[in-house]
Image (tube, rainbow, N blue to C red):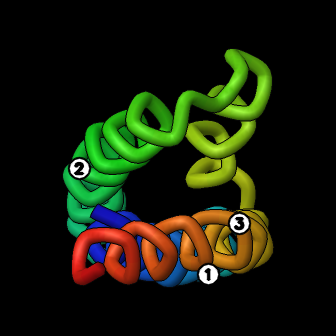
Amino acid sequence: MLTRYRVMAFATAVMLLVLCTCMIFKYGFDKGADLTLVVSQIHGVLFMIYLVFAFDLSSKAKWPFGKMIWVLASGTIPLAAFFVERKVRAEIEPLVTDGLATARA
C-alpha cells in the first residue's frame, strides 16, 4: 500500500513538472501544443490513479480530513508531492515495520 502510493506520488510529481515545462513552451514560445496535449492527458490519468492510492492509504492510516485533503491536493502543486511523499513515508514506514514485526512474533 505504501509502495503503490510512493510510486504514484513520484510519477505524478514528475509528470506535473513535465507538464509545467510543456505549458511554458506552449504559451511562452508558441511551441509544442501537441506534446502539451499528450502530457496533460498522461498526467490526468496518473493523477486519478494517485488519488485512488492516496485515498486508500489515508483511510487505512485513519488520517484526519485536513491531512487527507493536503495529501490528495499535493499532486496538483509542482514539487509539493515530493515533500509530502517524504513526510508520509517517514510517518507510515515505522507503522508498517512494527506491523510486520508483530505479525512474525
Q: Do the numbered discs 1 and 2 sit on residues whose CB atoms are within 8 Å?
A: no
**Disc number placed over residue 49 in the picture, else none:** 2
Q: Mark 1 and mark 2: span between their CA atoms?
A: 22 Å
Which secondary structure, mark 2?
helix
| Residue shown at the point (78%, 21%) measured from the top left | 66
Query: Label 1: which residue?
Result: 21
Answer left or right for 34 relative to 58: left
Residue 5 visible, this angle = yes
Amino acid beneath label 1: Thr
As drawn, 73 above or below 96: above
Image x and y of residue 69, in percent: 66, 27
In which quadrant of the rendered view does residue 92 lie? bottom right
Which image quadrant: the N terminus? bottom left
Q: CA distance from mark 3 to mark 1?
A: 32 Å
Q: Position of residue 62 (x, y in %)?
A: 55, 29
User: Residue 17's spot in the image, x, y percent?
Assistant: 60, 78
